[in-house]
Structures are given as C-alpha cells and as structure tokens.
Image (cartoon, helix red, strand yellow):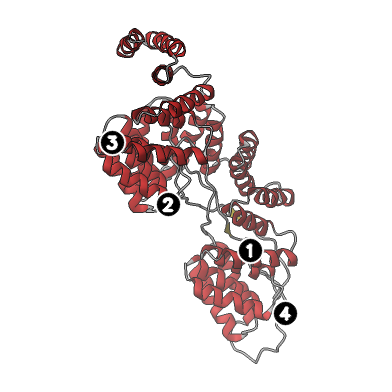
Amino acid sequence: MKLHHLMLLLGLGLVGGAVPLEVYAQTPPGGPGALENGGLELELGAPDTTETEILIPEVAVPETAAPEATTAAPAETGPSAITLYNQGVEQYTRGDYDAALESFNLALEKNPSLANAYVYRGLIYANQGDYNQALTDLNQALSLDPGNATALLGRGSVYYRQGETALAQADFNTALEANPDSVEAYLYRGLIDSQAGRHELALEDFSTAIELDPTNPSAYVLRGFTLEQLDNYSDAVSDFSQAIELEGDLPRAYMGRGVAYYNLGLYDAALDDLNQAVQLAPDMARGYLNRGYVYYRQGRTNRALQDIDSALELDPSLAEAYMARGVIRAEQGDLSGAQQDFAEVLQLNPDSAVAYKQRGDVMLQAGDAPAAIADYSEALLLDPAYTAALQARGDARLATGDVFGAIDDYSQALAIQPNDAAVYSARGAAYLQVNKPQEAYQDLTQAIQLSLTTADPELFYNRGVARASLGDDAGARRDFEEAAELYLQQGEAAGYRQTLDQMSQL
C-alpha cells in the first residue's frame, strides 16, 4: 500500500524597501507579510487528504507615484505631515512597525489626505492580523487615490487571507491594469488559480512574473509546484534548482525538489533534498513528513515512523501524518493504533472519505465486518464514485453473508470503472456462491482478459468451477490445469491440492 502526501505552495509576504523622500512621493511596499494561501496538492504515494498549509516568501513591489495632497495643510507646529510620513517609512523599512504606526497616525492627524500613509498603516494592521482595520485604511487610501496599485494589491492580499478569493482576484486584476508590471499581482493571481485547480492559468501568471523578474526565487518555487501538479516533474526540478541558485537557503524549494525527485523515482536525490530542507527548517513539520514518505518508499519503515512522529510532535493537527502512520501501522498489524490514527484524521477532517475507507479496511481486517460496512458507507456518502470503497463494502458484505448486497456493490463499482479486473473477479466469485455459473463465467473471463499480465490461479480455479457447473468439462479441465500450475509455481500447496480434487470430479 502506498502513502499519499499533500505538498505545499509557498505564499507571498509582500515587504518593501522604500527610501524616504524629501517630498511626498513615497509609495509603500505592497502587501502584508506572512500571508497564507490555499495550496496545491502533490502526491508522494497514497491516501488523499485536502489539508494544506502555505507559507510565504518575501517579494518586493515596484514603486508607483502617489499624488500630492490636494488641500493646503493648516499652519502647524512640530514636524510636518510629510516629515512624519517619511519617518514612518524609514521605521517601516527597518521593521519597527510600532514606531511606524505612531508616525503614520501623527502624519494623518496633521493631513488626513495622505493616501499612502493609509496604505502603509493598512499594511501594518494586516501584519498584526487586524484585517478589519487594515481594510478600513486601504479603502480610505483608494477613496483618495482610486488608481493606487499598491493599495489595490494590499487590499487584495488581505481579502486573500480572509478567504475572499473573488474580491482578491478583482483587486489583483485592477492592480494589473494600473501597473501591468506588478510581479506580486501575477503571483497572487496565480495562487488563486492554483487553489481553484486552474493550473494552466496559474502557470501562465507565474511564467509572466518570471519574465518580469527573472531573479525572483519565489516565482520559480511557485511555478515549480504548479509544474508538479501538472506531473511535469523534470521542469519542476529545473525551477526549484533555479530558486535554490538564486537563494540557497529556501527549505521549501529543497522540499519541492525532493518531491519532484521522488516522483521521478530518484529516491536518493529526494532524500538528500529533504535532509537539507529539515536541516534548514528543523521546525517544519512537513519536511519530516515528506522525508518519512521517502523512507517508506525505500523500505525503511522504522525511520519513516520516526519522521512521522516528529512531524506530529511539531504539528499535532497534521492530518496527513496521522493518515500515513495509520497506513503503516495497519501494514505492521497494529490495528488498534491504525484505528486511532484514522480516527484522528476524521477528528481533524470529518469529510475525509479516504480516512473512512482506511478505517473500514482496518475494521474488516480485525474481523468486524459490520463496523467496516458502516465506515465504507460513510465514505460513499462523501464520495459516491469512490470505487475502492464500493469494492471494499462488497467484500465486507460478502463476509457477513450478504452475497446479493456484495454483488450490488461490485456492480456499482463496475458501472463507474468498467475495466477493473479485481472487481470482475470478486463479482464472479460471488455469483458462484448464489449458483449463477453463467454470470460467474462471464465475469471471470472478463477478469482474465483484463489481467493478462498477472498470474492469479484463483481466477482460473473459479472459472473452472463455473465451467464445470455449465457442463463444459473440457474447458473446466483446462482452467483447473492452468490453476494447478500457477498454484504450484507460487508454492500454494493448499490451492494446488484443492484444484486436483476438483479435476478428479470431472
């Protein structure tokens, strides 16, 4: 059984490096830092979840000219509004946001028409997580200067963080009309498209951002994750490598490249990159989780479990880690531990059809078929086209003696996925139990035709039984001979003897 992994995008933290001016022509850098974005899913092996987490690389926003105040300021004592404003810019650039906030407050008391002071103050509030106040200031800036691209970008980034992606996208589109060279607007818009599954559109925006600024490592990382989502792992490796060349201490670039190497089957290279990611960011839970997947693929199960445990120590809400550990525990026969892990996934994500299906598998393995049926049914309520859950529920119903219920589940699975040899085999065996040899023969023949590259003696044995029931002794003998040879090759003595016994009755 494989393990799935959900990889992460990097997000955008917009910070700036503006220099104070002698006159009011300073434009703030664009957007709050440490924003989080909805992310892309990437596989590292098996059960799916939808949990994602996005962290944000820093990028700079180009400056645009802001209008001078249009009303004359009254006579004033002390520093002028412009002096206070430029003082705030210097403090903001140094990262002294509390002092900058005070300077912008004083500047706006003296001159409430300074649009860019509202923009800066809005960005500070956004950095502090006060999104309502941030929006108030950014809206005020836009009422004074409707074409202020930085204010639009900042407001869009706040909407994005609040999950208002439609409003965010509208602001980024308008920002690009005002400033078609805004790298950050393209990156944010690409993130929105990637979150919505519009990966080709996201790729276009990330590529445009790279054309505008070929030295921006974040753009390469974001495009790398999008390329992975499109299964273009070789080009993803190139983008992550370019990001690392531009800025060598990007742990998520190493993590992304490790995932790409993994999907290319280059496990040693993947492990090297994930080791580097963990070394650069020892508190990054997903770095350990991803490395655990590589260890698992290499057959180093204990090391995989150690890394998954480390991931959960760092982030107890990491549903993918519980899912992965549950799969490994089930494989090791620790059914109680696996059940607990899948229950944790469902606690964190009650809409995970995969977790219900996985827990149902554990219940069935433990001999509790009714509980397994209940979990498979929950999975199917969440995802009615989940063919693996339909087949598994059919198996569980068969275990309870509900053969016709099992046949119904197998039939539903085949209606969705008509070329599944395993389901034809299961339904054929079920038809034998209810004395329907013709239907059994048809299903088992279909399974054999679909399984030409496999050697399953049970298929030939069951079809031999069906043929014998239909009076086709010659065909039954041929199937039993094929089954006996396969059982013998595979060292299954009990199956071999059972087949010989059937042949003796012809």
Q: Can you tell which of label 2 and label 1 is closer to the viewer?
A: 2
Callout 3 touching callout 4 (CB < 8 Å): no
Q: Nearer the viewer, residue 200 or 182?
A: 200
Q: Nearer the viewer, residue 17 or 9?
A: 9
Q: Callout 1 environment at 10 Å: few (<14), some (14 to 19), or many (20+)?
A: many
Q: Secondary structure at mark 2?
A: helix
Q: Amino acid at mark 3?
A: Gly
Q: Amino acid at mark 4?
A: Glu
Q: For the N terminus, which image quadrant?
A: top left
Q: Determine which residue is flagged by label 4.
A: 68
Q: Amino acid at mark 1?
A: Gln
Q: Residue at image x 68%, y 70%?
A: 26
Q: Up-down: is 24 above or below 281? A: below
Q: Up-down: is 293 above or below 491? A: below
Q: Tell me the CA gap for discs 2 and 3.
A: 26 Å
Q: Secondary structure at mark 3?
A: loop
Q: Secondary structure at mark 4?
A: loop
Whole-percent x and y of residue 215? 68, 47
Q: Determine which residue is flagged by label 2.
A: 382
Rendered image quadrant of residue 260: top right
Q: Can you tell which of label 2 and label 4 is closer to the viewer?
A: 2
Quick check: 210 left or right of 191?
right
Callout 2 touching callout 4 (CB < 8 Å): no
Q: Can you tell which of label 1 and label 3 is closer to the viewer?
A: 3
Which dot marks residue 349?
none
Q: Determine which residue is flagged by label 3.
A: 401
For marks 2 and 4, the one nearer the N-term is 4
Which dot marks residue 169?
1
Extreme residue in the bottom direction = 75
Q: Amino acid at mark 2?
A: Leu
Q: Tell me the CA gap for discs 1 and 3.
A: 55 Å
